[in-house]
Image (cartoon, helix red, strand yellow):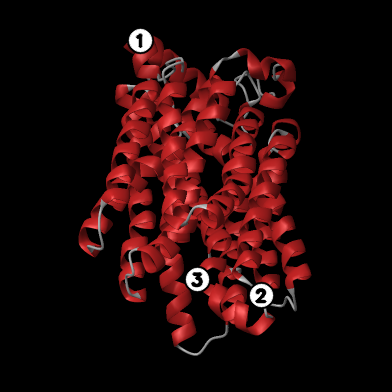
Amino acid sequence: MDAGKSWDTNYEWKTVALLTLGFGLVGLDRWIVAPLAPSMIGDLHLTPQDINNLVAILGIAWGVAAIFLGGLSDRIGRRKVLIPAIIIFSLLSGFSGMAMGMSSLLMIRAVMGVSEGAFCPTSFACVAEASLPRRRGFNQGLQQSAFALFGLGFGPIIATQLLGAGMSWRGVFLLVGIPGLILAVLLWMVIREPVTAQGHSDSAERAPLSAVFKHRNVPLGMLALLCSMCGIFVLSANTPIYLTTYLHLSQAQMGFVTSAIGFGGFLGQWLLAAASDYWGRKNMSILGFAVGAVFVWLFIQQGPNPMMLFILLFIGAGFAFGLLSLITGPIAVEAAPLGLISTAAGIIIGAGEIFGGGIAPVIAGSIASSYGIQDVLYFALAGLVLGIVVSLFLKETAPRKVQGGSDLDRLESRMGSALEG
């Protein structure tokens, strides 16, 4: 049977396109608070520590939800988790614009983290199931690249332009919540549950939960994602302060340099996972951590030269961000037991989010207070260096690396049948 002819490519690309936009909106809703922070601080009498707490509580809630709710769609179906989740976090993004103080913002951002933590592994599972195995890394990299592009690339531009045009920070929150509601309708029209060739849902044949940790790439993936998130999240949160207070760049120069994280991350999240389809998950993980570490170190050593800083940060952040899509995408999916793709992804994502999105920024803040902002970047660098060691123990799972061409075609044919009907 010809796998290419039997595969539903039309459904594959519709799913990838819609969930790429969906994950981009996750990034936008998550990071839009940073460029809006100066206006929020003035209106609500907040402090910079309050803004960091808002970032941290969303990350921790995301991680906990990914662990405990990540496997929910394996049991009740993708649509029943995916569509309510995007509706909830889109509405909560709008509700952020109605908050009257820190307490309400903390509550809103925490619940938003829960809904995004449920959406994230479920969306990854949907893309994996819709993708031809030999295109899985390419598709999951494309999906996850939108997080950096929308959240850290376009987000600051959108926020500052709307604020400059006279819109309040409350209006910006309300506006960015609308696209998610539209996308929810499109997902309801397109996304379908995977079925086996026998017509039964995958959840009916799923492996026992205890099987999740039998593949060594699950615990290793948790450690690797923790390392990569420590690198990229600490870098993202502290680079603007480092550039303005330590290197004494202007606000405009700082904005230019910092945008390298978003645009470099976009390319890195797409290309590193895509390259792993050809050269292997393990090899690309080692390469990503190594190159990311080298360029972050060079960035730390660079003086106040905006163009050189941009180039070094673009490359360093690109490889560091690329690791996020590689680890939570194909590495997690290919380590998952039958019927537990979303569960395995959720466990790996949760471990990384709780530390990288929540605890690591707190540690970074303590380092900044005790030693100075310049030493915080060495904490990010340490995470990337440790990731090289963890990656050495990963088991290779890329279909092109572990299977012959005929075996791969048979696998793709079976997966194609699982999505028919």
Place of residue 331 in the rendered image (x, y in percent of width and height, measured from the top left): 48, 26
Q: Residue at x 33, y 47 (%)?
A: 267
Up/down of 225 relative to 84, above or below:
above
Q: Residue at x 63, y 45 (%)?
A: 359
Q: Are marks 2 and 3 in contact (CB under 8 Å)?
A: no
Task: Pick out the residue farthest to the bottom.
Answer: 166
Q: Identify the residue position indicated by label 1 in the image.
A: 406
Question: Closer to the N terminus: mark 3 or mark 1?
Answer: 3
Classify mark 3: residues with Cα within 10 Å, few (<14), some (14-19) or many (20+): some
Q: Identify the residue position indicated by label 3 in the image.
A: 35
Q: Residue at x 44, y 17 (%)?
A: 397
Q: Identify the residue position indicated by label 2 in the image.
A: 46
In this rendering, the label closer to the viewer, 2 or 3: 2
- Is disc 2 placed on a helix, strand or loop? loop
Classify mark 2: residues with Cα within 10 Å, few (<14), some (14-19) or many (20+): some
Left or right for 107, reference 341: right
- Is disc 1 placed on a helix, strand or loop? helix
